[in-house]
Amino acid sequence: VAENDRPVVGVIGAGFGGLRVAMALRRAPVEVVLVDRRNYHLFQPLLYQVATAGLAPGEIAYPVRASLRAQKNLQFRLAEVARIDLAERRLYTSTGAIPYDYLVVACGAETNYYGLASVARHAVGLKDLDEAVVIRNHVLRMFELGAQERDPETRRAMLTFVVVGGGPTGVESAGALSELTRLVQLRDFAELEPQDLRVVLLEATNQLLSGIPQPLQIATAETLWQKHVEVRFGATVTDFDGYKVTLRSGEVIPARTVIWAAGARAAQLARSLEGPKGSLGRLAVEPTLQLPGHPNVYVIGDAAYWEEEGEPLPMVAPAAIQQARCAADNIIRQVRGEPPKPFVYQSPGSLATIGRNAAVAEIGRFRFRGFLAWLVWLVVHLMRLVGFRNRLVVLIYWAWDYLFYDRAVRVIMPDARWPWTVPGDDRRPGAGPNSNTS
Ligand SMILES: Cc1cc2nc3c(=O)[nH]c(=O)nc-3n(C[C@H](O)[C@H](O)[C@H](O)COP(=O)(O)OP(=O)(O)OC[C@H]3O[C@@H](n4cnc5c(N)ncnc54)[C@H](O)[C@@H]3O)c2cc1C
């Protein structure tokens, strides 16, 4: 209990769920302590545009303190939560302990490499800004090195960009990469031919965007092929050593770049917490979103496992946002001495873009694709971005890119994670993407 006798609500994570919980408690008779290891709220749906040089990092991230400046009952702590002590009701963080009366765990998810150590070491996930910037730097650098490479096979490997995972992130990344490489980069590289370039999308099952109806899945694959993305089904990756991707079938694809969009699992903090787990290490919650046996603890968003009609709730932003409202309401009810209410999910539908003028959408009874779906995607994403300045700047970038086939952020920043500075260096044994990070 805080000095003013108000109960303290600890919130872990300032992502889609945590930020909304904090905001929803602004008039409640509680003190909120919001903890995140980064000082910004990240709009993950547009991360792939940072990775493909369309947007700068600052445009999809917004400082947490600026979002919550006017909120009097809130403190923000920039810290890593290392451990939650449920019995003591205390968070142990990199900057000290934080006692709480109520807790909301909204620590999200992390990339799942399914135990493939070599892939984890050499591929890059797409979960945070630093990874998106690493991908951007690397793709742009591969063009520079590829243009100087005399051996055609090595050049082609340098200019082969492999995306693993046919979910929304993989589809969007592959579409955007193809457009960056063919429509934008190629215009500036007279040394290169279209046949030097490859964008390959590898999917282990036989479908893309598994949550949407089959006709839209087929349309997605067709559109990607039209955009020169090689879509490969039944392609399970077993290894990537920085030079070649190996598939379960034994096939080898020479490539220097692998973007790993093949899976997520609950963040380490959630996985380390005791209690029943659903798939992907997510914490199983009561219908009220409370942690079983701990009525003062709520788990929401990607970290929470909750089933509706026998199906696990998808790891998407609307689920986290709706659960945030429910958790905040339930805490207010508990403070008033009322029982918490069960959560009810309302699916807003699915949207995925495949690049310029192309998207697929399922909203309620309506299924559509093409230009209209793409426009809906643009408006929805623009409106959901946090901060008016970000919305305005992103709109200007998009309009510019659309009209002039340009990408705003084609600068290669010095990048300590990558050892390659001159062509040939990368042939050192053991060298490769990320090899100096461990
Ligand atoms: C590339 C990509 C594209 C996506 N596209 C879409 C899309 O188009 N539409 C859609 O609906 N969803 C999309 N998603 C999914 C969506 O982003 C997530 O479902 C949503 O962010 C979940 O919200 P959350 O609050 O649970 O977690 P997050 O938003 O991930 O927030 C978790 C927060 O917790 C913090 N944190 C984690 N562990 C700790 C710790 N130990 N200590 C301190 N802080 C910690 C993190 O820094 C982070 O800020 C996408 C995800 C990715 C990665």
Image (cartoon, rainbow, N blue to C red):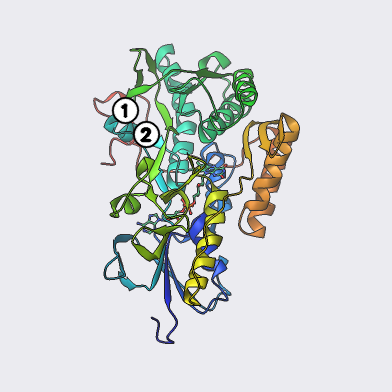
Is residue 227 something one can see in this rendering? yes
Q: Position of residue 397 (x, y in %)?
A: 67, 44
- Residue 346 lies left or right of residue 86; in this view the side is right
Question: For the residue labelled by badge 1, is the local secondary structure a helix, a strand or a loop?
Answer: helix
Q: Which residue is identified by label 2?
A: 421
Return the residue nearer the eye: 425 or 88. 88
Residue located at (33% from left, 30% from top): 119
Question: Does the residue at mark 2 contact the one at mark 1 (Cβ under 8 Å)?
Answer: yes
Residue located at (44% from left, 59% from top): 13
Q: Which residue is identified by label 1?
A: 425
Return the residue nearer the eye: 60 or 99. 99
Q: Position of residue 97 (x, y in %)?
A: 29, 71
Q: Position of residue 200 (x, y in %)?
A: 49, 21
Residue located at (47% from left, 52% from top): 301
- Residue 304 lies left or right of residue 121; in this view the side is right
- Residue 324 lies left or right of residue 394; in this view the side is left
Near mark 1 (Cα within 10 A), the count class, few <14, some 14-19 or many ≥20, is few
Alpha carbons under labels 2 and 1: distance apart: 7 Å
Query: In the image, what residue type sits under mark 2?
Result: Thr
Q: Position of residue 64 (x, y in %)?
A: 51, 64
**Within the image, what quadrant is residue 61 found in?**
bottom right
Question: For the residue labelled by badge 2, is the local secondary structure a helix, a strand or a loop?
Answer: loop
- Residue 286 lies, with reference to residue 159, above or below; the image says below
Q: Where is the N terminus found, in terms of image quarters?
A: bottom left
